[in-house]
Structures are given as C-alpha cells and as structure tokens.
Image (cartoon, rainbow, N blue to C red):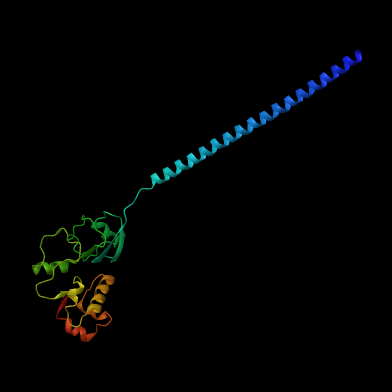
C-alpha cells in the first residue's frame, strides 16, 4: 500500500512539473509575440514619421521656389562705350541699359533720353550725339526741348532734305538707295549694330559688296 502511494505521488509530481514547464513555454512564446508586435508597430510609426518629414520638406522646398519673370533683351547703340545686346531683369529702366553698355561717351546727348522709362523685351535704345541732335534741331525735325520722353528707340526723324540716315534708317528705307538691295541693306544694319553706328558716310565702303561704284551712286543720298 505504501509503495502504491509513493508511485502515485511521483506520478503527480512528474505531471505537475510537466504542466509548469508547458506553461512557462507558453508564457515565453506569448511574450515574444508581444515584443514582435510592438516592434512592428513602432517601426510603422517611425516610417510614417519619416514620410511626414519628407513631405513637409518637399512642401517647404516648393514654397521657397517662387516663379520668376523672364529677363528681357535690349539693344543699346549709338554714343555708348560698348554697344550690343544686353540681358536685363524685367522692369529695368533705360539708365540701367545704358549702364550695362558701359555708359555714354563724351559725345552723347545725355539729356535727350528719358532714362527713367521702363524697357520692354526686344527694345532698341539709341543714344544720339550732341552734334547729331543739334543738326536735327536746326533742321526742325525734332523738338528743341531736351529730355523728350519716349526717345529710346532709333526714332529720330529724318531731315527734310530727303537723305537717308545710315544710323537710323530701316531696312526698307535703305533699300530705296541706288544699288542697295535687301542683302546690302541688312549688311548695313548689321555693321552699324556691331560698330555702334557710322561716324562718316565713307564707312559705307567697308561693308562687303559696297565699293566705290555703289558708293558713288548713293553718297548724295545718305547722311549720318
């Protein structure tokens, strides 16, 4: 009888230990799953935070970029130090175009232009000389008042003598000259743009295709 009781006790203890061991394993597995879930959840939150930061940075970058107006291009010629085409910010004024061309020369009629006038893309700013301005005033082709507004293009009227001004004439006007066709007229305009204007009518012979023969035909029809 005593032996039977001992066997029952041993079996009960063995079963109890086995049960405790199984419970311990279950608890360990449950704890690991909880940690994994926690890490997964935390990782998801961190990823969302990173995405939010990236979106915020992207939004901020776009907010900093403001649309800018395109620059304008103007051609400055006549009595300036460096004639040429210049790129300027929008809403620039005439005085800024002249400054970009190195300023006026000593011969320039500095008070003729309205230097506060706004420029437009593709505009030409022609700075006449004092001598040129005086001759045209004496001919009665322009007002004698200085600082006339709007005189920023090559728009000084021709004198009533019927001669064509090499420095201001359009291509069509140049083509009215004897022996001057479209090609030569374009060459004349290109020459004066590169050189900043003619200083004498004899300079016309420096243009390719215009020699003594052609010059002899037009010399009484042109002026500067």
Q: Quadrant of the C terminus?
A: bottom left
In the image, residue 155 lies at what x, y percent? Answer: 17, 66
Asked whether, in this view, residue 66 is left or right of residue 25, the answer is: left
Q: Is residue 48 above or below residue 165?
A: above
Q: Dividing the picture into quarters, in which one does residue 12 lie?
A: top right
Q: Is residue 223 above or below residue 25?
A: below
Q: Quadrant of the N terminus?
A: top right
In the image, residue 154 lies at what x, y percent? Answer: 19, 66
Q: In the rendered image, is residue 224 in sight?
A: no
Q: Nearer the viewer, residue 175 or 212?
A: 175
Q: In the rendered image, is residue 136 in sight?
A: yes
Q: Dividing the picture into quarters, in which one does residue 136 lie?
A: bottom left
Q: Is residue 82 above or below residue 2?
A: below
Q: Is residue 31 above or below residue 101?
A: above
Asked whether, in this view, residue 183 is left or right of residue 3, the answer is: left
Asked whether, in this view, residue 82 is left or right of residue 131, the answer is: right
Q: Nearer the viewer, residue 224 or 45?
A: 45
Task: Report the residue at 20% width, 64% height from top.
Answer: 153
Task: Report the residue at 57% width, 34% height from top.
Answer: 42
Q: Nearer the viewer, residue 123 or 129?
A: 123
Task: Report the residue at 25% width, 66% height from top.
Answer: 77
Q: Dividing the picture into quarters, in which one does residue 16 lie?
A: top right
Q: Residue furthest top?
A: 1
Asked whether, in this view, residue 201 is left or right of residue 38, the answer is: left
Q: How many marks?
A: 0
In the image, residue 184 lies at what x, y percent? Answer: 24, 79
Task: Report the residue at 76% width, 25% height from top.
Answer: 21
């Amino acid at each position: 009888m005593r032996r039977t009781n001992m066997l029952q006790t041993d079996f009960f203890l063995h079963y109890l230990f086995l049960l405790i061991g199984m419970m311990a394993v279950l608890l360990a597995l449950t704890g690991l799953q909880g940690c994994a879930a926690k890490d997964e959840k935390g990782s998801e939150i961190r990823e969302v935070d990173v995405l939010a930061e990236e979106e915020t940075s992207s939004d901020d970058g776009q907010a900093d970029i403001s649309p800018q107006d395109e620059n304008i291009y103007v051609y400055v010629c006549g009595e300036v130090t460096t004639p040429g085409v210049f790129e300027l910010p929008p809403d620039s004024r005439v005085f800024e175009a002249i400054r970009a061309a190195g300023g006026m020369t000593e011969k320039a009629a500095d008070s003729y232009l309205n230097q506060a006038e706004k420029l437009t893309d593709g505009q030409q700013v022609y700075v006449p000389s004092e001598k040129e301005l005086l001759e045209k005033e004496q001919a009665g082709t322009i007002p004698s008042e200085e600082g006339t507004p709007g005189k920023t293009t090559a728009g000084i009227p021709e004198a009533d003598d019927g001669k064509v001004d090499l420095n201001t004439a359009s291509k069509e006007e140049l083509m009215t000259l004897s022996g001057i066709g479209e090609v030569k007229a374009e060459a004349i305009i290109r020459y004066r743009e590169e050189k900043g204007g003619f200083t004498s009518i004899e300079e016309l012979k420096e243009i390719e295709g215009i020699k003594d023969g052609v010059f002899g035909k037009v010399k009484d029809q042109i002026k500067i």
